[in-house]
Image (spheres, rainbow, N blue to C red):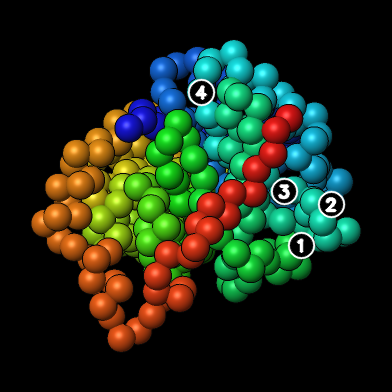
Amino acid sequence: MIRVALCQTPCALGDKEENLSRMRRMISKQDADLYVFPELFLTGYMIRDEVFRLAEDLNGPSVDAVARMSSEVGASILFGMAAWDDEMPGALRNSAVMVSPDGRVQRYDKVNLANFGPFEEGLYYTPSDSPALMDVDGTKIGVVICYDLSFPELSKWYALQGAEAIVCLSASPITSLQTFEGLIPARAMENTAYCIYVNQAGTQLNQVFFGGAEAADPKGVRLTKAAYFREDMKVIDLDREMLLSARRGRPTLRDSFRSPIRICGGHPAKNPTHLNDRKR
């Protein structure tokens, strides 16, 4: 399968050029097939109404810069950004964008916006109404963003479409630490898929993000854990034989089709790609 780098580095709030520089520095540390950065990494999370000034579309200069990095290192890069919708004028999305060396740009827009407690995403972003299965060198990846991980039907949909890993880009403060450290192995185990979590780290305005990037294998066993609150990077290899062994031993996907409760329609779609991608 593929090698994945969990890239945890604090953001410079509102400074896209600096964050792209930090991305480049992190990528230079380790070889990988896929580098994963947190939710809204390009600008930082706590930008509030500055998002309308800082957001770009997928043909903008920041995605161009990431595309050049991807081409240089021969690997895909997945990161969070505020992106204008391609087809709905004025709609702003909390997006996960994957840029690949062949020029493809794949995109997932957050379905479940956090709009409670300290979170104000509903003030700025428009929620998506569909998932987007991504592909890295033939490995199918189901991407979710932060609060999305609390909705098991979304991860289950990806698994039923053939996702071998659920990748969560997050901006979770310290108050959510126990929640996410419980969700990660649960999503892995119930879908017999790898679950990869990369979180913001450090302080932005009045929020302290705990970092703690981690990955669980398809049996729910933790594979790696990054430091809390500070920069760190961890690299894991996704092993297809281990994934197949887990699915034989605990056939949750097979038995999802037997369940009287049909999640997201139950059976895989006839056209299961749902790849929101383009060539640059």
Residue 198, position as x, y percentages in the image: 45, 43
As drawn, the residue found furthest toward the bottom would be 260
Question: Which amino acid, by three-letter code, is at mark 3?
Answer: Ala
Q: Closer to the camera, 76 or 15? A: 76
Residue 249, position as x, y percentages in the image: 11, 56
Q: Closer to the camera, 266 or 7? A: 266
Q: Closer to the camera, 273 or 227? A: 273
Say if mark 1 contacts mark 3, CB within 8 Å: yes
Question: Which amino acid, by three-letter code, is at mark 4?
Answer: Ala
Q: Residues within 10 Å of mark 3 (few under 14, many from 20)?
A: many
Q: Separation of disc 1 and disc 4 at Cα?
A: 32 Å
Question: Which amino acid, by three-letter code, is at mark 2?
Answer: Phe
Residue 48, position as x, y percentages in the image: 75, 55
Mark 4 lies on residue: 75
Residue 171 falls left or right of residue 177: right
Say if mark 2 contacts mark 1, CB within 8 Å: yes
Mark 1 lies on residue: 124
Q: Secondary structure at mark 2?
A: helix
Mark 2 lies on residue: 52
> The N terminus is located in which quarter?
top left
